[in-house]
Image: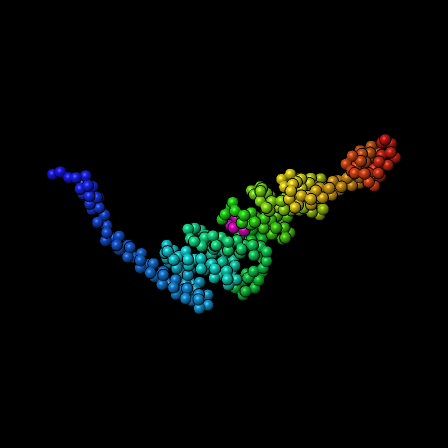
Amino acid sequence: MLFSKTSLLLLLGAILALPSCSSDPEQARLSSEARALDGRAQGLYNASYAAEKAGEVSSAVKGYKKINRLYPMSPIAAESQYRVSRLLQNDGELLKAFESYNSFLKNYPASSHYADAMKQQEVIAHNVANGQIKNSFLGWKSRIDAKRTAEMLTKVRNNAPRSVSAEKAQFTIGTMYRSRKNPQKAIEAFRILTRDYPLSQYAPEAQYQIGAMLLDEAKGGNQDAANLDRARNAFEDLLIRHPGSKRAADAKRQISKISSGDTQRSYDIAEFYRKKGQNRSAILYYKEVVRTSTPGPLRNKAQAKISELGGS
């Protein structure tokens, strides 16, 4: 018997379809169970949403959380997690809201709410860094410790590491540590910013803050040349990398102050040696003052001392 090409194709399709027929009952059963689960999830969602609209926030949150616990693969699970996050945020439970958003971002990256969840998490992290929030079941307000605050901002940064929000989060880590009197951690955070985001709008300020804190450290009693050199280098780096920034003029002034301080220290050392009768050493330092200073009283005094000690 001869078959046309079309008939052969139809016969082949029918043969290939035969094995699947045996699994139809199982597939139908699984499909039916899935629909039943989705139906229960949807029913629970409807009840939770009704509670939310009635102002029963606690009941709504419990219901939404139950959906995520029992039906995490349901199409409504992402919406439930998102609504939990928003309700907690609106109720002032910012720490809980932050973690809820974090779970949402981790588990539901395809959700239409993903971008907003990232934005809201960023808002919460910066609120925590910049102020006091409710931090107890009694509703008292207290400042969140620096380590946890930095961890929250780091999560914001890592969620979108090449975005402006990442640069801002890293900058806020530095400013937060500086405001809490931890210059070492602040300098470390600002250096990460200038290294990883050299073209960031926050980079000039971060570089300036590095120099300012190193200078503060030197003024605070640790006035060795190494500390001052590091401060000077930080300000000079700012001028090299960001010559047109608003902080460039400030950096120049700081460099000038450091240089003036160096000159004054050289003069003080010269005086120390002169009083001890070590004139040769004194003359060397007086000459250093003349070499590094601009015309003025200090330079005139150094030149006079050189002549007085026969240093010509």
Quick check: 311 above or below 108? above
Asked if the magenta segment contains residue 154, the reply would be yes
Residue 146 position within the rendered picture, expressed as x and y whole percent measured from the top left: 58, 53
**Horizontal placement of 24 versus 37: left or right?**
left
Residue 191 position within the rendered picture, expressed as x and y whole percent measured from the top left: 60, 43
Asked if the magenta segment contains residue 173, the reply would be no
Quick check: 4 above or below 149? above
Quick check: 271 above or below 80? above
Q: Nearer the viewer, residue 187 or 87?
A: 87
Scheme by which the image is coloured: rainbow
The majority secondary structure of the magenta stretch comes to: helix
Q: Which span of residues is magenta-colored? A: 153-157
Quadrant showing the C terminus? top right
Residue 230 position within the rendered picture, expressed as x and y whole percent measured from the top left: 67, 40
Residue at image coords 83%, 41%? 297
Residue at image coords 78%, 38%? 293
Residue at image coords 58%, 48%? 171
**Horizontal placement of 18 versus 248: left or right?**
left
